[in-house]
Image (cartoon, rainbow, N blue to C red):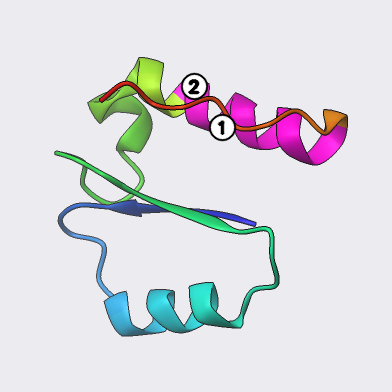
Amino acid sequence: MFFIYAERGQGGEDLSQDFYESASEPKAVWEVPGATHTAGIEARPRQYERKVVGCFDGALLGKPPVRDPS
């Protein structure tokens, strides 16, 4: 499970934390710096693509996650 949150304007932070804590492993969370709700791809397009594709690679191909240099 991969949770992506906006740094600002997300709303429902307590509920989001509850979802994360309730999820089974493997799980990851990313708070997108500078993003508002649903705008993570616009705020950090290369990082967003790398993280989302990495999540699918791990889940579907068993590849380890790519370390984010930032």
Q: Give the amino acid type for the residue marked by disc 1 in the picture.
A: Val
Q: Return the x and y of residue 31 as percentages of the image width and height.
A: 30, 50
Q: Nearer the viewer, residue 28 or 10?
A: 28
Point 46% across, 84% down: residue: 18
Which residue carries the number 1 mark? 52
Name the residue type under label 2.
Answer: Glu
Asked whether, in this view, residue 8 is left or right of residue 19, the answer is left
The residue stretch that appears in magenta:
49-60
Q: Quadrant of the N terminus?
A: bottom right
Q: Is residue 52 above or below residue 11?
A: above
Helix, strand or loop at label 1? It is helix
Q: Residue at x 37, y 29 (%)?
A: 41
Return the mark for residue 28.
none
Question: In x, y percent, where is residue 37?
Answer: 29, 52
Residue at position x 60%, y 82% from top?
A: 22
Question: In the image, residue 49 lies at what x, y percent?
Answer: 49, 22
Task: Say whether marks 1 and 2 touch (CB < 8 Å).
Answer: yes
Q: Is residue 1 magenta?
A: no
User: Where is the C terminus found, in terms of image quarters?
Assistant: top left
Describe residue 36's horizontal placement relative to residue 30 as left or right. left
53, 43: nearer the viewer: 53
Spatial CA distance of label 1 from label 2 is: 5 Å
Residue 10: which quarter of the image? bottom left
Could you say where residue 47 lies in the image, as x and y percent from the top left? Answer: 38, 23
Disc 2 on helix, strand or loop?
A: helix
Q: Which residue is mark 2?
A: 49
